[in-house]
Structures are given as C-alpha cells and as structure tokens.
Amino acid sequence: MPRWRVVWTLLTAILFGVRLSAAADKATLDAAFAQLAGYDFGGDATALTTIGNLVTASYGKAAERKELASRLTGVLTSAAPRGAKDFACRQLAIIGTADEVPALAPLLADEQLSHMARYALERIPGPEAEEALRQALRKVQGKLLVGVINSLGARRMVAAVDDLASLLSSDDPAVAQAAAAALGKIGPSALGPLEQAWTQPSTPVPVRTAVADALLRCAEGLLAEGKRDEAAAVYDRLIRADVPSVRIAAARGAVLARQAAGAALLGSYLESADPELFRAALVLAREVPGQELTKALTAPLDRLALEQRIHVLEALGDRLDRAATSALLAQTQHGDKQVRLAAIRALARLGDAASVPRLMELAAGDDPEVAQAATAALANLPGKDADAVIQAFLGNENPKVRRAAIEVLGHRRVATAAPAVLRAAADADESIRLAAIKALGEIADLALLPGIVALLLNASSEKERLAIEVALAAACVRSSNREACLAAVAAGLGSAKPEAKTSLLRTLGRLGGEGALKAVRAALHDPLESVRDVAVRILADWPDPNAGNDLLALAKTSQSKTHKILALRGYIRLIAQGDSSPEERLAACNEALSLAERDEERKLVLGVLGGVPRVDALAMVVPLLAQPGTRDEAVAAAVAIAEKIVGSHPSQAADAMKQVLANTASAEIQQRAKEVLQRAGVK
C-alpha cells in the first residue's frame, strides 16, 4: 500500500471514527511496520507517526493494543536499526504489559538501548518489570548499572531494598550514590540499611552525603505516615552530620516532627554556637506559624549576640505575628542603634495602634536615622485605629512630636485629620507650619482649598509661600472638581500681594482650562512687571492651543524682547502640537518666520515645516538652506518634505534637492536627496 494511502486511511479512521475492514487494518499495520523495520534516526518518520497514532487510538481497546505490542516486541527481537528499537521502547512504555518484559529485559545490557528499555520497564505495571530490573543489577556495570538503580528507585521497589543495600559499599562512588538515592525514594522500608551505612566510618564522604539525603527522605516518609517520633529520631541523628545543608534540613525536620513541642528545640537552636542550627531556626521562623514558635523566638532575644539578634528581629517581622509586638517594642529601647532599627522595621510590618506611642517617641528623637525609620513604620502601620491614635498627638506639647504626627498623617493620607493639620499650618513654630503645609498637599480636600489659599495670601516667608504653592497645586490636581478648584484659586487673586499672586497664577497654569486662561490673560496687563513676567511665562507653557492667539499678539506687540521671544517660542510649540489643517499650520509658520529675529526660533519653525507634506512648505524652507545659522535644520526639513511630495511635484522636489546637495556635508542627507532625485527622474 502506498505511504500516502496508509496515512490517509489511518487519519480517516481516527478523525471520523470510521471502522476499517480487517483487511484494511492489517494492510495499514503491515505497511507501517514494514517501513519501521528499516527506520533509523534521521530517516523518513512517516511510519513512526502512523504507529504512534494507532497506539493513541487503541486506548481502551485491549485486542488492538495486544496486537500492536506484539508487533513492537517483534521489532525489538529483530535486526532492525537502533532508531526503530528506540521508538518501539517508547511505545511499549505506553501500552506494554508483562508479556513484553522478556523482550525488553535483555536490552538492559545493551549500551545503546539500555536507557530506552528502562524507560519502558519503569512504566510497565506489575512485578515482572520490577523483577527484570532487579535481575539486571547482577548483569550490568558502570553507567548502565546506575541507570537500573535509578529505575528501581523510580518504581520505589521495596523488594529490591536488600539488593540496593549491598551496593552502598560499591567501589564505584557513582553506583553507591545512586543506590543511596534509590533507597531514599523507596522510603521508610529502606531505613535500616541506610542507617547502617550512615554509622560506618569507612563510608566515603560523597556517598555519606547521598545517604544523608536519603535518610532525610525516609524521615519525610515517616512523617507522612504519622510516625512522628521515629521521624524525629532520624532527624536528631542527622543534626550531627558533617554536611551543612543536611544539618539545616534535619534541624528543620526535628522541629516540625515534634509539632508544638518543637518550639523549645527551636529556642535551643537560637542560642547554639552552631551556625547551621541558627540558620535552621531562621528558616523555621519564616515557615512555621503559631504563637508558641513566636514565643520561642522572642524569649532569648536579650541573650543573643547583636548580629544574631538583628537576624531574629528581621525574621519576626517576616512572620507577621502580632504576638511578637511587645518584644519588638522592648528591643527599640536597646542601646545598639542597629538593633533598634531592626525592631522598628519589624514593627512597621506587624505593629498596631498599641505601637504608636513608642514609635512617635522615636520619630521625635534626635537620631535622624532612627526618627526616619520610626516615621516610616508609623506611615505603614495597618488599621484605622492607628490613625486615631496618631491624630491625638497633634495636641502634644512637644513640638517635635507634633511635627512627627503631622508628617505621619500626611504619609498615611488621613483625610479626617485635614482640618487639624490646616490649623497647625498657622503654628508659631516654622518647622511645624512647613510640615503641616506639606501634609495638606497629601490630604486636603476641596473644602479646605479656601483655607490653603488664605495661608498663601498670609505667608510670612518666600520659603513658606513656595511650600504652600506646591501643596495647593497638589490638592487641586488630586481633586476631581477642576472648576471648583479654579474658582477657589482665582478668588484669591483680587486681594493677593504680588508674590502671592504669582503663586496663584502658577497654580492656575498647572490646572489649565478656559477659566484659568482668562485669569492669566488678565494678569498680562497687571501694573507690576513681576506679575506680567510670570503671566507671560505661564502663557508660553500653556498646554493647549487656546493660548495661541494671545501668544501671537504678545510676539507682535510686546515691548520686552524677552517676552517676545518667550511668546514666539510658545506659539511655535502650539503650532507643532495642534491638530490644525496643513493650510492653517503653514499660515502660522509663515507668521512665525516673519516675527523670528533669531536663528533659534527659525530652527523651531523648520522643525514644524518638516512635518507638513506640502509644496508650499518646501518653498518656505528653501530660502533658509543657504543661511549658515539654519542650514542643518533646513536641509533636514527640505528632504523630509521632498520625500513625501516628489510623486506629485517632481520638479520642485528635484530643484530643492539640488540645493540641499550644495549645502550639506551629511552623507545620510546626501543619500536621501539623491534618492529623491532618482524618483523625480533626474539622473
């Protein structure tokens, strides 16, 4: 049967559930297996696909599976190439039974096929496959023996424990290590020989490490079976191992096996001179919940060395068990600053309202690092209860405490504290006023904006006024009612002194909108030059095109050269940002060029023109090609325009490109100009 016919017939059967005739079934199998008999790696894999699909389709069909398995076994016992036998083993791993074990077993001694034979035998159910693997222990050596050992471990074959145990003393370290690992996978049934190997002084170190790992697995198995005392005994013996990783794992297991009673053992680890046991305690501290363990961690704190104490404090923070809060608060009294900092950082994670008084005391202290850590801890304490306790400190007689409370309330964004913080912004102490002003920027709502504006109007220093300006802008930006914010800010303009007026105008500039623009526009005619200057600068940075006409008028009529330049640059920026038509943009660029007295502004206009694909835009650029101050920007703009219009205006594009080539040394620009000339038909 042709190959295409085999594949088509098979797909029809699988995809459409068509039952093939017996003759067609046999023909399909015969053709596929005939092709498989000659297959090797790198050859035509059609037969593999066909047979693999048949194996998949045989699920739940015992007779068909038996037929396929028989044929695959025939491949194994034939002179077929290695690739065919490799494939047969893979398929028998799926459908093989005890009947196929006799054909697979001899392959365990085959250097090339042993791995795939084991792959199949590991997965074939029943004692026959296990026995074949066990018998192979006496027939193979080296890497093949290691592989068979691994397979017995993968099958967790209890009956092979004695055979594997005998290999623990093998002269080949790889074999002995593999045997230990396999016994560990088998679990508690292998405990006896593993413990015997563990106690033998002659056991080499690499093998001893493998035995220790295997004993750990056995102990885990005992725990899973509920045999906690036996597991604890194994862990206790391994704690004395000379392998650090094993000791840490064993120390952990010894605590877990004892459950609640393990807390005392963990406490002893903390005070042990053994660094591995201390590390095990830190691992457990982060892993095992419960107040008993927390007590075991906090009890020896005062007896620990400073470095150890810091590590335990960090672990207590990671546990998030508030049972440790009182111990942490006590450690904030410690003489060593690093201990205090570690305790404060832990309180930031698990503290509560009860922690506030001590943390407030530290936040108001003289050590900047400790004060900063305490402030951060207060800012992160969870719960509304903490908000209320912190707010109560606003009435404290100590200015440092009041300032710390204000800062924390701002960090926590406690909106209910805003009225009290606003009152604090009028405190006699400047440091408190500045802290309150900053906090208002974080927590003030729309209702407090008039009060903040009033603060601005009455600011006693430039430093304070600028701080209020920042807070006012922050509060406005945070509000969803932009119009109400504009009204509150604009209301202060009438009675504001010049310095306060400029702050209010800058705030309006940040808010934007027609109402703000109207106020800034009016300020352009203020009798004071300082106010007019700020208004011009705000207008020059206006975020939307509504200010375009105002800027153009300033650029034309202002008596101040600085203001004319600022206005023109702002106008050009708005041309670039706007969504006007090409005609409108060209007209605006022409107006800007007529007003530009410096090359700096002409360059800005050229940047806009380069994005306008119009022949009249190119005409505006060409006169600037020969001017030294604008040459580079002009050639870039001319090429950018010409590339877009060469199809519709080839002669104008070509003329411009000839001038570009005469005025630039840039290889990139020259290449682009030449390409435009080619497209224009100029040789």
Image (tube, grey):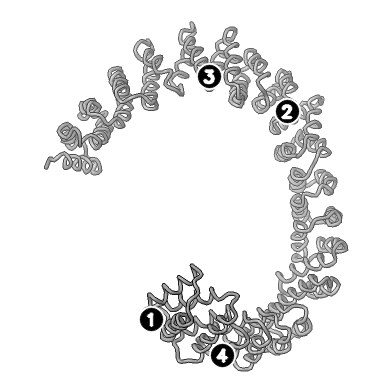
Disc 4 residue type (three-letter): Ala
Disc 1 residue type (three-letter): Met
Residue 146 percent coordinates (x, y): 61, 84
Q: Which residue is mark 1?
A: 1
Q: Which mark is residue 584?
A: none
Residue 182's place in the image compared with 313, above or below, is below
Cα distance in 3D space between marks 3 and 4: 90 Å
Query: What secondary structure is marked by label 4?
Result: helix
Residue depth check, mark 1 versus mark 2: number of the one nearer the observer: 1
Dot 2 alpha-carbon crowd within 10 angstroms: few under 14, some 14 to 19, many 20 or more: many
Dot 1 alpha-carbon crowd within 10 angstroms: few under 14, some 14 to 19, many 20 or more: few
Residue 62 percent coordinates (x, y): 60, 80
Disc 3 residue type (three-letter): Arg
Disc 1, disc 2: CB below 8 Å? no
Cα distance in 3D space between marks 2 and 3: 26 Å
Mark sitting earlier along the chain (3/4): 4
Query: What secondary structure is marked by label 3?
Result: helix
Q: Quadrant of residue 427?
A: top right
Res. 627 visible in picture: no
Q: Which residue is mark 4?
A: 103
Dot 3 alpha-carbon crowd within 10 angstroms: few under 14, some 14 to 19, many 20 or more: many
Q: Is residue 514 left or right of residue 359?
A: left
Q: Name the residue at the top extreme.
A: 527
Who is closer to the viewer here, 234 or 500?
234
Q: Is residue 482 left or right of residue 654?
A: right
Residue depth check, mark 4 versus mark 2: number of the one nearer the observer: 4
Q: Which residue is mark 2?
A: 406
Residue depth check, mark 1 versus mark 3: number of the one nearer the observer: 1
Q: Quadrant of residue 91?
A: bottom right
Please name the residue shown 38% across and 26% down the image. Answer: 579
Q: Which residue is mark 3?
A: 506
